[in-house]
Amino acid sequence: MRILLFILCISYTFAHSQTVLISNVDEFIGVDIYEDIYYLQNNSLHKKGQNEYLNIQYGKPTTVDISDPLQIILFYKLFNTVILLDNKLNFVSEFTVPFGTEHVANAGKNKIWMYNTLKMVLTIYNFNTQLTEATSPPLTNKIVQLNGNLNKVVAKNTKNQLTTYNFVARPIASELLSNQQKPISLYKNYSFKNHTLFQDQKVILKYPHDIVNFDVVNQTFYFFKDNNISATPFPKK
């Protein structure tokens, strides 16, 4: 009886608070600090309610970094190419990266983090000076997701380990994710496990279905499921 009441309570909460924001999306990229939503559709990068960017030559970007909304980073792995866009999704510049580059991420003004799967290292690359400013020790496991900023980068590897590296590419923290999902940004101290959103160990809300990925901005839970981007606010205390 208690289980039934619990399920009914969850269903009622989401029926009255969940909002589908965008439908028929191919990939959810994330939400920036201004609560602008980014997604991929038909190989184009979209910013909800604003412009879109399509590169006919390169096609669909491998990854998109929106951690700095004023310098959006598109990586096209097959072409070893990075394209920078401004906050209106206008083209700013383009440069190549070394062969074997698997992931790139923001590292501050004029810099990116790069993971090279052939050398198995993380580097900080200044694309203005074309110089490598820092290199990590050799890594044991392959990186599958990377998110960075001026001070650090967070890397998720094939062992489901989340490792943080400082501004000189040295590991400073590591944790095993134990099957929980982390936000797209990897940074925020949220996780989704067993249909529950946690902040650290605190339960924030429950959602009765599996999701592809999610982000949290300004106490709103954005999630991607069935090609739709939806959102629900945190419950009031």
Image (cartoon, rainbow, N blue to C red):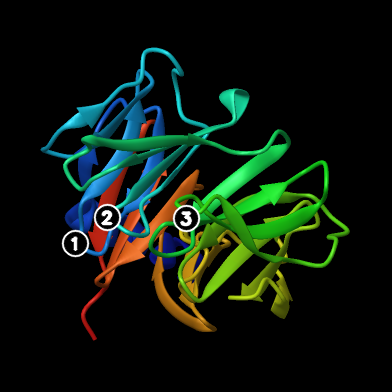
Rendering coords of residue 64 (x, y %):
43, 42
Name the front one of labels 2 and 1: 2
Name the front one of labels 3 and 2: 2
* Precedes in sequence: disc 2 or disc 1: 1
Q: Are marks 2 and 1 in contact (CB under 8 Å)?
A: yes
Q: Residue at x 42, y 13 (%)?
A: 57
Q: CA distance from mark 1 to mark 3?
A: 16 Å
Rendering coords of residue 142 (x, y %):
79, 50
Rendering coords of residue 190 (x, y %):
48, 72
In the rendered structure, which amino acid carries the disc numbered 2? Answer: Pro
In the rendered structure, which amino acid carries the disc numbered 3? Answer: Ile
Residue that label 3 marks: 184
Res. 154 image quadrant = bottom right
38 lies left or right of 152: left
Image quadrant where one finds the C terminus: bottom left
* Secondary structure under the numbered disc 3 in the rendered image: loop
138 lies left or right of 163: right
Rendering coords of residue 23 (x, y %):
26, 30
* Precedes in sequence: disc 1 or disc 3: 1
Return the residue nearer the eye: 236 or 95. 95
Residue that label 2 marks: 69
Q: Residue furthest left?
A: 49
Residue that label 1 marks: 34
Q: Residue at x 59, y 55 (%)?
A: 131
In the rendered structure, which amino acid carries the disc numbered 1? Answer: Tyr
